[in-house]
């Protein structure tokens, strides 16, 4: 038997679902954290999150699904990932984050964009 794992990595939480390939039935779902993820705002208009935080919650959600469903996640045939739109994640040559990600609700460049369309 095979499964599909879906991950939605959002700015408020990570949602995960495990589906049975043959029936399409949801085998398990989980959200991590149970409360909303914090958005860092070191200056007015800034909105950032560290990518390692998302990974921590991906791992937690997947572990939760494994525990809830009792299924062998080695039987996952494919993983689908959706991610918050308009996020900027800067990484080094090894793929490690260089800084907090600038996320969709950041507004530090609004004036620059407005000036570009004058």
Image: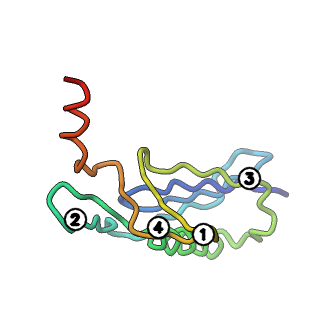
Q: Earlier in the sequence, mark 3 or mark 4?
A: 3
Q: Quadrant of the C terminus?
A: top left
> Looking at the image, is mark 2 or mark 1 nearer the viewer?
2
Q: Earlier in the sequence, mark 2 or mark 1?
A: 2
Residue found at the very far top of the displayed protein: 118
**Label 2 CA crowd tier, 10 Å (few <14, some 14–19, many 20+):** few
Disc 1 to disc 3, how far (Cα)? 15 Å
Q: Which mark is residue 41?
A: 2
The location of residue 106, given as percent across then percent down, is 27, 51
Disc 2 to disc 1, how far (Cα)? 28 Å
> Looking at the image, is mark 3 or mark 4 nearer the viewer?
4
Mark 4: secondary structure = helix
> Looking at the image, is mark 3 or mark 2 nearer the viewer?
2
Residue under label 1: 62
Residue under label 4: 51
Give the camera-side residue of 94 and 65.
94
Mark 1: secondary structure = helix
**Residue drawn at (85%, 57%) of the image:** 1
Question: Residue 7's quadrant in the figure?
Answer: bottom right
**Residue drawn at (77%, 60%) of the image:** 76
Residue under label 3: 20
> Looking at the image, is mark 1 or mark 3 nearer the viewer?
1
Residue found at the very far left of the displayed protein: 44
Protein image colouring: rainbow
């Amino acid at each position: 038997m095979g499964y599909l794992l879906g991950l939605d990595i959002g700015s408020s939480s990570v949602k995960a679902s495990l589906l049975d390939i043959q029936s399409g039935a949801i085998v398990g779902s989980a959200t991590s954290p149970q409360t909303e993820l914090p958005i860092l705002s070191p200056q007015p208009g800034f909105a950032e999150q560290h990518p390692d935080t998302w990974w921590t919650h991906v791992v937690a959600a997947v572990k939760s699904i494994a525990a809830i469903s009792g299924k062998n996640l080695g039987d996952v045939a494919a993983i689908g990932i959706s991610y918050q739109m308009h996020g900027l994640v800067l990484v080094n040559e090894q793929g490690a984050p260089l800084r907090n990600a600038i996320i969709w609700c950041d507004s530090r460049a609004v004036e620059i964009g407005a000036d570009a369309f004058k």
